Image (spheres, rainbow, N blue to C red):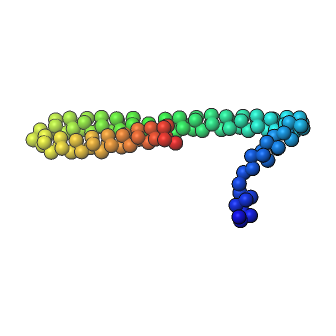
Amino acid sequence: MNSLHVAARLNPLAVVARASLLAQRPAAAAVAAVAQRQLLHISSARRDIDQAAKYIGAGAATVGVAGSGAGIGNVFGNLVIGYARNPSLKQQLFSYAILGFALSEAMGLFCLMMAFLILYAF
């Protein structure tokens, strides 16, 4: 067998022997326990920061939904004004209003989709 393959295998007896050596040296075990506790503390703090960043990012992404609502209100408000000015263009104005509504609503849905992706996919 190749020496590379032999070295790559994990020897369970070596792991047990190392654990018994740590048990024989209480100072080394105490240092290892402190280091592991610090590592756990760092990972917990990092996890909290990552979670907060996800919520901030999702909140920032949902601001676009409010902009979409304002855009839809603007489209239909101008539709009413256009009807009042020239009632004979009712059908053409309505088709343009529906197009504006669809484009504005699509942007709002994209923002909402990105917020959900930030929260649940990453």
Q: Which quadrant of the structure image shows residue 16?
A: top right
- In the depicted view, which residue is nearer to us: 93 or 23? 23
Q: Residue furthest left?
A: 88
Q: How many numbered marks does the figure carry?
A: 0
Q: Quadrant of the N terminus?
A: bottom right
Q: Residue at x 52, y 42 (%)?
A: 122
Q: Which quadrant of the structure image shows residue 53?
A: top right
- In the depicted view, which residue is nearer to us: 98 or 93? 98
Horizontal side, residue 78 vs residue 44: left or right: left
Residue 115 on image: x %, y %: 45, 39
Q: Residue at x 21, y 38 (%)?
A: 79
Residue 62 on image: x %, y %: 44, 36
Up-down: is 6 above or below 28? below
Question: Is residue 31 in view?
Answer: no
- In the depicted view, which residue is nearer to us: 88 or 6? 6
Q: Residue furthest front?
A: 1
Q: Residue at x 79, y 38 (%)?
A: 35
Q: Residue furthest bottom?
A: 2
Residue 20 on image: x %, y %: 84, 39
- In the depicted view, which residue is nearer to us: 42 or 78? 42
Q: Residue at x 39, y 35 (%)?
A: 66
Question: Is residue 33 in view?
Answer: yes
Horizontal side, residue 61 vs residue 106: left or right: right
Horizontal side, residue 8 vs residue 115: left or right: right
Residue 9 on image: x %, y %: 71, 54
Q: Which quadrant of the structure image shows residue 71?
A: top left
